[in-house]
Amino acid sequence: KSEQELDEHARTQIVEDSIYVMRMNDFGGYTVPAQGLYPFQWNWDSAIVSAGWAVFDEARAWEELEKLFSGQWEDGMVPSIVFHRPSNTYFPGPDIWGTPQKPSKSTGITQPPVAALSVRFLYEHTENPELAEQKLVSLFPKLLAWHRWWYKARDPENTGVVAILHPWESGMDNSPAWDESMKFPIDKLPRYVRCDLNHVDSCMRPTQETYDRYLTLLHRFKAANFYDPSRLYWISPFRVTDLCVNSILIRANRDLRWLALRLEKDDIVKEIDEWLNKGFEGFKQLWDEDSGLFKCKDQLTGKLANAPISAAFLPLFAGVATKEQADKLTHNLERWLGQVNYGVPSMDPEDHRFEPLRYWRGPVWIIMNWMISNGLRHYGYDELADRIKDDSISLTTKAGLREYFDPLTGDGAGGRNFSWTAAMCLAWLD
Ligand code: 9YW
């Protein structure tokens, strides 16, 4: 067979596999990221996964989002994990979090606010406009409440950018961007046993010391009147301006604005415009001219995090980078890509902390590739955007629907049969 035929065969196969994986991970209205390793509904995973469902089962796609919002707290927060059903293969589960039922068992922290992007995606790709209109009307107030929560609970000082209080909130758990900010003392912890190492080799996961710090934060937040949002911002020993959450929030604000216009909600459009304007200002403090990259910032020390991570390129996705900044970013990105066989590594491969297999300290993540490539296209860097898309196709067709990939060898790593990787193959790479 010719190479082209083989390629086409591999592409058809990956679409079939992706649908199979999504169905397999469907636990009834919500999709688990990966069986065993992550057996509940994760927030930003689900938002991304709903776009995958939209390609072959629109009703199920809307259901995914509705199920996620069934876990929304009264104050508007949407938790990072909703524990719809018990499972003993993940730590820390609902017993450790011990959140009051509000209305489902959940964690007491949140995750990147992707959902507004998904609602717009589903609405624009609908084959059933009546259904889409109805879903938009019911989901819109929930999205709005969540975005308002971000500004009220996580930017009480009105800086234009929001804070994360736990590395889990960024979605990039052990990113080198948190190394300095995670140096607070570890509390005396109740004895615990991790479950992740039953599923994935320890060389691909955060270290034990990192886990002790994750748990220290969890227990401190729980002691603050069960994750009281008006207190957490002030008591947390970890308070960071994260590029991933802030870029996604700005992008989600744009999509929320688009949805508000559809619903003719002029006052809300104005409110969102204020968030966008102050967000644009807020991002200025995250630009590091010396390296030509955006950086995360420790809000407690006021210092930029000295870590060149792939989220540095996400302000392109948010549309908040200037043309000059975009040029410098792409210059860096080209250098990074020149050092690896598959992009985009989650940190600068020339940095001494780069580890090609350890989670957020080197591996390629397809969802990051999607956001970076989308941002590049928006700024007119089509060739680079294509290169990242091609790399993503090569990785998934060669190594399968893995959680992340080694940028040097292209080998798959972490969890297998991974839902958001499958969703990206359906909604982006096909
Ligand atoms: C954890 C589910 C989640 C993702 C995060 C990723 C990892 C581990 O897996 O978190 O214990 O929550 O870092 O982004 O949502 O895929």
Image (spheres, rainbow, N blue to C red):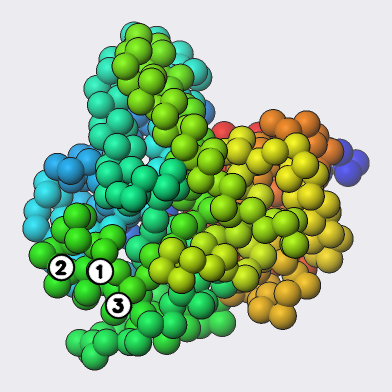
Compared to residue 179, the image places residue 342 above or below, namely above
- Amino acid type of the residue tagged 3 in the rendering: Leu
Q: Say which residue label 1 marks.
A: 235
| Distance between the alpha carbons at the discs numbered 2 and 1 | 8 Å
Whole-percent x, y for residue 61 in the image: 39, 31
Is disc 2 surrounded by few (<14), some (14 to 19) or many (20+) residues within 10 Å? Answer: some
N-terminal of the pair, mark 3 or mark 1, is 3
| Distance between the alpha carbons at the discs numbered 3 and 1 | 15 Å
Q: CB under 8 Å between callouts 2 and 3? A: no
Residue at (75% x, 62% y) in the render: 290
Residue 29 versus residue 16: which sits nearer the camera? 29
Viewport quadrant of the C terminus: top right
Determine whether, in the image, residue 389 is placed left or right of residue 33.
Answer: right
Q: Is residue 348 visible?
A: yes
Residue 219 versus residue 340: which sits nearer the camera? 219
Q: Is residue 132 visible?
A: no
Task: Name the front one of labels 2 and 1.
Answer: 1
Q: Say which residue label 3 marks.
A: 215
SS label for mark 3: helix
Q: Say which residue label 2 marks.
A: 224
- Amino acid type of the residue tagged 2 in the rendering: Ala
Say which quarter of the image contains residue 323: top right
Viewport quadrant of the N terminus: top right
SS label for mark 2: loop
- Amino acid type of the residue tagged 1 in the rendering: Ile
Determine whether, in the image, residue 166 is placed left or right of residue 55.
Answer: left
Task: Name the front one of labels 3 and 1.
Answer: 1
Is disc 3 surrounded by few (<14), some (14 to 19) or many (20+) residues within 10 Å? Answer: many
Residue 15 versus residue 301: which sits nearer the camera? 301
